[in-house]
Image (cartoon, grey):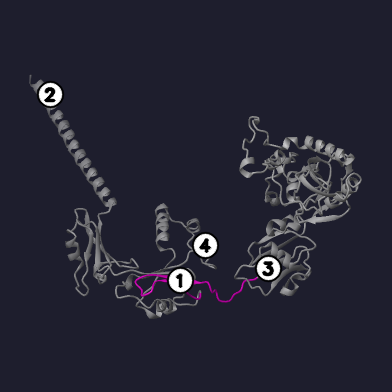
């Protein structure tokens, strides 16, 4: 009877605690307040529909937490919000229980239990000890509803040392962010941080010391964490941690890894650095690397030593301050090299080559040879513009202009020639010796156009266009011009050229044989000559006018003299 009375009191107290948790009333005709979730699934589910406002409030927090809490290592403290499940003769769930500033949780009928500085299993044991005084054979399970923020202390060479409030489940990078950037103590400002502060060489981010309240000391290496994702290098902070960040001088020892690795870098030296550790931070080797060794270059009294490290020693070799680790390239055959062939070949496409060794003739043989429709005289080869080990400043027009004494027109002509000629390689498919000597490189492209069986006539002709070409016909250039309607009025008949297909070489008609694909160009009278002619005609007309005016002036003067003389003579006679 006494036990039943006790249970009734417990249930009454529990109802007071959990009353806000019932979002759907089971009473017929009840109304919910405005804004509540107005959905009753009791009849549909044939059970009890329960909505937990506390869970919804916690889930709607704007601040996310990383990962999940480990009950074996998490230490309870003031302001932790927990739930306590008591399973005995009757099951009791107590949610929203706060660990008060004394480190106690106050439970109905059980009383105050001190749980601060205890892990969750230890706290469960302590609550069970006290609950067993009231309930027989009870079991206790604790869940953390909302972990408390943690207070950390940051010291050392940072610009904003002091006490900071960090989010629960914060790692070192998030905890120290404000101390090296703005010093803002707002808890929400450190959520969306990045690795941007690592760009400052003033502070040691590879040797961060963390002193725990239990006396233990651990380290954080944020460079390793951000480059490799190693969480052990960026541990969670705990309440009361003292984090020390050293300030680095300009002369602080450094270490680097470069060469055939995915990410070359230089960073501060750390005593535990090994070649393997640096290789991991660098993201490992690139495919072209010689993975059989790593080279360490070390300055000594006698000069710079070159030390070759075998793979079995990468994890044990002790690096010294200012050592430089270099991964060498494998100078073997580049198996990924290829060249492209387009146009009139039996099998156009992309073909494997040995860069710098495969010849153009071998490439053509891989395609099965040219077709009968190919215009071999117009074939050309273009180089890959991203060649490794190419000539420095190759076709760097800005550099050529800097050392040139040409006028503006000459520099404009230089730009035009550069755009036309860049990356183009002369090739003659009829010259077997030249094809054998021409070596290909990765990314080269060979173009073999189709024979159009036409000649293009353009420039100062009346009807420019394409005209059929008959092989071995020996039709003169003048006849093609006649087919194009003859010379236009502004044509310069002394400046007619044949532009060869493929290499675009200009010839006088008498110096070459017209072939399919060639172009006939009729030039016009130069604009400069026309302007000069117009200026000459104007000057000539002006001079003629001046002479005429001079003659008229002279006649007028003579006439005046004669008239004056006659007048004087008449006066004397009178």
Question: What segment is highlighted magenta in the picture?
Answer: 328-354
Q: Main secondary structure of the magenta part?
A: loop
Q: Tell me the element at label 4.
A: loop
Q: Earlier in the sequence, mark 2 or mark 1?
A: 1
Residue 568: mark in rendering: 2
Task: Give the residue at mark 3.
Answer: 326
- Residue in view at x 62 percent, y 41 percent: 43
Dot 4 crowding, Cα within 10 Å, few <14, some 14–19, many 20+: few
Q: Nearer the viewer, residue 422 or 271?
A: 271
Dot 3 crowding, Cα within 10 Å, few <14, some 14–19, many 20+: many
Q: Tell me the element at label 1.
A: strand
Could you tell me how far apart the alpha carbons at marks 3 and 2 are, in whole angstroms?
117 Å
Q: Tell me the element at label 3.
A: strand
Q: Verify whether residue 344 appears in magenta.
A: yes
- Residue in view at x 64 percent, y 61 percent: 263
Q: Say above or below: 380 vs 117.
A: below
Q: Earlier in the sequence, mark 1 or mark 3?
A: 3
Could you tell me how far apart the alpha carbons at marks 2 and 4 are, in whole angstroms?
92 Å
Q: Position of residue 368 (x, y in %)?
A: 38, 78
Q: Nearer the viewer, mark 2 or mark 4?
A: 4
Q: Quadrant of residue 81?
A: top right
Residue 339: mark in rendering: 1
Q: Are marks 2 and 4 in contact (CB under 8 Å)?
A: no
Q: Are marks 3 and 2 in contact (CB under 8 Å)?
A: no
Q: Quadrant of residue 487?
A: bottom left
Q: Nearer the viewer, mark 3 or mark 2?
A: 3
């Amino acid at each position: 009877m006494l036990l039943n009375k006790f249970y009734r009191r417990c249930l009454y107290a529990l109802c007071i605690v959990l009353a806000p948790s019932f979002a759907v009333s089971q009473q017929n005709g009840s109304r919910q307040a405005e804004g509540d979730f107005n959905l009753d699934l009791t009849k549909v589910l044939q059970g009890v529909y329960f909505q937990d406002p506390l869970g919804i409030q916690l889930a709607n927090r704007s601040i996310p937490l990383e990962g999940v809490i480990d009950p074996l290592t998490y230490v309870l403290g003031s302001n932790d919000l927990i739930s306590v499940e008591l399973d005995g003769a009757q099951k009791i769930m107590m949610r929203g229980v706060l660990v008060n500033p004394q480190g106690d949780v106050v439970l109905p009928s059980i009383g105050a239990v001190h749980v601060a500085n205890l892990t969750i299993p230890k706290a469960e044991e302590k609550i069970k000890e006290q609950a067993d005084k009231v309930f027989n054979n009870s079991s206790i399970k604790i869940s953390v509803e909302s972990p408390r923020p943690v207070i950390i202390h940051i010291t050392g060479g940072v610009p904003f040392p002091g006490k900071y409030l960090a989010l629960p489940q914060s790692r070192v990078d998030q905890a120290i962010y404000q101390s090296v950037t703005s010093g803002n103590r707002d808890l929400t400002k450190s959520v969306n941080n990045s690795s941007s502060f690592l760009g400052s060489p003033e502070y040691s981010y590879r040797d961060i010391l963390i002193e725990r309240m239990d006396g233990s000391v651990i380290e954080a290496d944020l460079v390793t964490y951000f480059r490799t994702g190693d969480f052990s290098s960026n541990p969670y902070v705990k309440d009361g941690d003292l984090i020390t960040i050293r300030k680095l001088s300009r002369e602080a020892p450094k270490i680097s890894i470069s060469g055939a690795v995915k990410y070359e870098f230089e960073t501060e030296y750390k005593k535990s650095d090994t070649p393997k550790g640096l290789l991991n931070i660098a993201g490992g080797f690139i495919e072209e690397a010689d993975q059989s060794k790593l080279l360490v270059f070390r300055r000594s009294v006698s000069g710079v030593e070159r030390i070759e490290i075998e793979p079995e020693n990468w994890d044990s070799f002790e690096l010294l301050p200012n050592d430089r680790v270099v991964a060498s390239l494998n100078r073997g055959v580049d198996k990924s090299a290829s060249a492209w062939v387009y146009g009139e070949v039996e099998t156009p496409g992309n073909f494997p080559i040995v860069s710098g060794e495969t010849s153009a003739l071998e490439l053509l043989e891989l395609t099965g040879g040219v077709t009968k429709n190919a215009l071999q005289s117009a074939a050309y080869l273009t180089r890959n513009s991203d060649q490794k080990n190419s000539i420095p400043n190759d076709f760097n027009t800005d550099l050529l202009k800097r050392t040139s004494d040409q006028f503006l027109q000459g520099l404009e002509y230089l730009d035009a020639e550069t755009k036309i000629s860049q990356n183009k390689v002369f090739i003659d498919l009829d010259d077997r010796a030249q094809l054998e000597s021409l070596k290909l490189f990765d990314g080269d492209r060979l173009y073999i156009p189709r024979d159009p069986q036409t000649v293009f006539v353009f420039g100062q002709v009346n009807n420019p266009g394409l005209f059929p070409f008959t092989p071995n016909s020996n039709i003169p250039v003048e006849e093609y011009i006649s087919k194009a309607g003859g010379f236009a009025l502004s044509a310069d008949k002394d400046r007619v050229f044949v532009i060869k297909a493929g290499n675009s070489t200009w010839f006088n008609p008498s110096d070459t044989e017209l072939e399919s694909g060639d172009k006939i160009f009729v030039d016009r009278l130069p604009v400069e000559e026309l302007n000069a002619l117009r200026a000459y005609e104007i000057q000539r007309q002006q001079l003629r006018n001046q002479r005429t005016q001079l003659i008229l002036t002279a006649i007028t003067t003579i006439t005046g003299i004669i008239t004056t003389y006659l007048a004087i003579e008449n006066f004397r006679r009178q």
